[in-house]
Amino acid sequence: MREFIYYSRTAPTSGNYIKEDLHQSGRLDIAIHSVIASFFLSHKMRTDVKLHLIFSGPPDPPKHLELKPVTEGETDVDKIYLSKRNVSGILKRMLYKYREGQKKEVFPGYWIEKKPFLHVVNELSNEGKNLYILDERGKDLREIEIEKDPIFILGDHQGLPQKELKRLKKICTPVSLGKRLYFASHTIAIVNNELDRREDAGLL
């Protein structure tokens, strides 16, 4: 299992705040592309990925959306149909289904709760998870040893919250994709590719 934590300081935290123009909806388009990069292969869905979305935009931050889509069973009974076209609708419905004080499973494999970014990271760290943070000054991803069941942390177009980076770098291994900066979704695709190659070679 591999996991990604995507943080957005602008993504909306209520379904009412999602407009038709996703670019004007707290850059929800970036989160949607990140969902696609996390789970979709050509003609196939990944079953070895969990994605954490931390939205900190208006009106009720923060919201933690956890996605580990169920892919087996009957559609609309055991699972829901996830396609590239309906990601925004699913995220919107998840936000609508939020209930205060609960971690609610909205669909099979889709949960929502109110939890800050650093709390999510700390919980996973306390569970003994292997955490990696994307940082242009980190060690090259291709040159480091990656432990089993890794978790990679990245931010949106505005990056990760500066006040929390110092804490994060104490509990995470900083890793870099090189000298160039990539979109969040491209970053996830590159990391997925590197992990795929290592798994195929029996190195992970």
Image (spheres, rainbow, N blue to C red):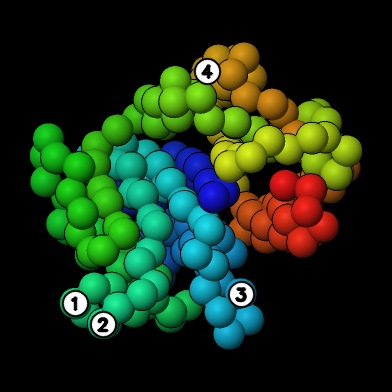
Say which residue label 3 marks: 41
Q: Residue at x 42, y 47 (%)?
A: 53
Q: Amino acid at mark 1?
A: Val
Q: Is residue 57 visible?
A: no
Task: Pinpoint residue 202: horizontal percent, then vertical percent.
Answer: 78, 53
What amino acid is labelled 4 in the image? Lys
Q: Nearer the viewer, mark 4 or mark 2?
A: 2
Mark 3 vs mark 4: which is more N-terminal?
3
Instruction: Look at the numbered disc 3 and give the secondary structure of its residue.
Output: strand
Q: Is residue 134 visible?
A: yes
The three-letter amino acid code for the residue at tag 3 is Leu
Determine which residue is flagged by label 2. Answer: 74
Coordinates of residue 190 in the picture (x, y in percent):
73, 57
Considering only order in the chain, which callout, 1 or 3, is on the residue closer to the N terminus?
3
Q: Which residue is mark 4?
A: 163
Q: Secondary structure at mark 1?
A: loop
**Mark 1 and mark 2 residues within 8 Å of each other at the beta carbon:** yes
Q: Which residue is mark 1?
A: 77
Residue drawn at (18%, 49%) of the image: 104
The structure residue drawn at horizontal position 44% and vertical position 25%, both measured from the top left corner, is 127
